């Protein structure tokens, strides 16, 4: 027996909202890491710093090319904080590979990259009057990586560092100091927000250490006196067409939710501004805040489980808002069943999360721009990841769903929840 999906869970960025502002924030964060005297302090590394911000629109592709962003997302790097971290790390690897002699800051080093490491390396390069400017291509460095998750791809990053630049193993660590530095700089450029607390180091039962995710504050941290050249973000398709899509889906009887890596306030603000919030079930908005809180609760219970996509937690949280963290993690680990739902996303991480949650996966190509080669590569990756259907944009979604039927299987609907003995019909 085959059934049609009844609930639709949307990724937000690349499906509803444009990510161009995020990508520019990532580029600005990387530029600051390399140009600011607070870090490497390499003057005019990407472009003539004195011409900032006017030069940024023309030169930003030198910092992180669109092809590199697209390929990182093809490798399941879903978060723009992670894109900032991996891009900055790849630039640092490339910089180290160009040096004829290994700097003292790197030679014999034990431990990860940190702000102090960047300052020491930059000071040494300036002392030896090494004037460096960016030239090269990041794409070949990641072309052999296999799609997995940001957490697991860090091992690929360190292997690349060892093979290309030769530094000691473990130079890069996920959600550690350098990752958190990239995250903070991204937030500062993107929203003017700062981290409300420093990331806290904790040790798991098996001795593995990891950073606890920090909260994001709305207070300003624009202390550098630089004017951000980032333009206001918009939707991936015109708003009237987007509203027409959601009107059609409501008429077809679908319940709509969102599973995104954005903090909740960064999701609600544009949805209200665009008058789109009314289309969604507010209990089915799964954001960074819910994922971070769940990771923290599981950590206190003695379990270190990274729950960001492609882990299906965010999708299942949107489908079953009243279920407990333990239940959702157990369902995801069982790896079976179908919840009569479809996930609509633009990245490999979205498709993998959908399939791990037992959902229909609909991939969209609108989030990555109009470059034909990039779109063809994205479509290939989405299909290889298991997408049941790939469409150009959500404009095609109402028609595509009429042709999709969900395979029957293990159905979570009707299971008794921990927070009550009654049966629920969440989807």
Image: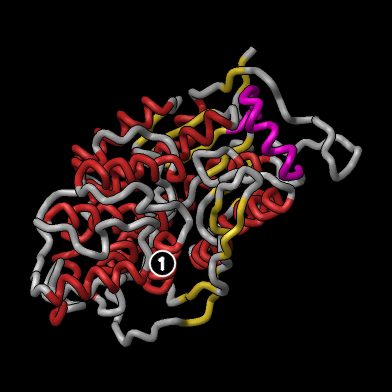
Q: Left of 12 or right of it: where is 14?
A: left
> Where residue 50 sits: x, y (%)?
14, 82
Quadrant for residue 9, please give it. Answer: top right
Towards the viewer: 67 or 163: 163
Quadrant for residue 2, please give it. Answer: top right
> Where residue 185 sits: x, y (%)?
38, 70
Towards the viewer: 291 or 395: 291
Q: Is residue 388 visible?
A: yes
10 Å neighbourhood of mark 1: few (<14), some, or many (≥20)? some
List the single residue furthest toward the right.
Answer: 421
Q: Residue at x 64, y 39 (%)?
A: 316
Quadrant for the N terminus, please: top right
- Which segment is the magenta one? 323-341
Which residue in the protein does label 1 denote? 181
Q: Residue at x 64, y 54 (%)?
A: 290
Label 1 secondary element: helix
Q: Left of 190 or right of it: where is 251?
A: right
Q: Left of 317 or right of it: where is 352?
A: left
Quadrant for residue 426, please give it. Answer: top right
């Amino acid at each position: 027996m085959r059934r049609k999906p009844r609930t639709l869970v949307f990724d937000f960025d690349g499906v509803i909202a444009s990510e161009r502002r995020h990508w520019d924030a990532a580029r600005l964060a990387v530029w600051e890491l390399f140009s600011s005297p607070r870090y490497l302090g390499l003057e005019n590394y990407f472009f003539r710093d004195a011409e900032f911000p006017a030069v940024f629109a023309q030169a930003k592709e030198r910092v992180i090319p669109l092809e590199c962003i697209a390929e990182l997302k093809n490798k399941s790097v879903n978060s723009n904080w992670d894109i900032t971290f991996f891009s900055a790390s790849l630039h640092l690897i490339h910089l180290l590979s160009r040096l004829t002699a290994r700097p003292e800051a790197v030679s014999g080093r034990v431990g990860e990259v940190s702000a102090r490491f960047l300052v020491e390396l930059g000071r040494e390069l300036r002392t030896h009057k090494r004037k460096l400017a960016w030239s090269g291509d990041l794409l070949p460095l990641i072309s052999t990586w296999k799609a997995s998750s940001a957490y697991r791809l860090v091992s690929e990053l360190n292997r690349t560092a060892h093979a290309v630049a030769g530094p000691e193993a473990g130079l890069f660590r996920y959600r550690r100091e350098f990752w958190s530095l990239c995250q903070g700089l991204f937030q500062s450029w993107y929203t003017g927000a700062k981290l409300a607390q420093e990331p806290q180091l904790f040790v798991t039962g098996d001795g593995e250490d990891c950073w606890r995710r920090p909260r994001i504050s709305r207070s300003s941290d624009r202390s550098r006196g630089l004017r951000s050249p980032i333009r206001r973000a918009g939707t991936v398709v015109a708003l009237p067409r987007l509203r027409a899509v959601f009107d059609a889906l409501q008429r077809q009887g679908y319940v709509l939710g969102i599973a995104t890596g954005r903090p909740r306030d960064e999701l609600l603000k544009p949805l209200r501004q665009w008058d789109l919030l009314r289309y969604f079930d507010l209990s089915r908005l799964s954001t960074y805040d819910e994922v971070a809180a769940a990771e923290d609760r599981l950590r206190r219970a003695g379990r270190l489980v990274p729950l960001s996509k492609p882990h299906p937690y965010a999708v299942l949280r949107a489908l079953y808002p009243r279920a407990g963290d333990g239940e959702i993690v157990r369902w995801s680990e069982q790896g079976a069943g179908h919840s009569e739902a479809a996930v609509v996303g633009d990245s490999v991480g979205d498709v993998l999360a959908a399939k791990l949650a037992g959902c229909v996966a609909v991939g969209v190509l609108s989030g990555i721009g109009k470059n034909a080669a990039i779109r063809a590569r994205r479509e290939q990756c989405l299909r290889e990841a298991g997408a049941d259907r790939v469409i150009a944009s959500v404009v095609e979604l109402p028609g595509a769903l009429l042709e999709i039927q969900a395979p029957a299987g293990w159905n979570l609907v009707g299971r008794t929840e921990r927070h009550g003995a009654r049966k629920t019909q969440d989807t």
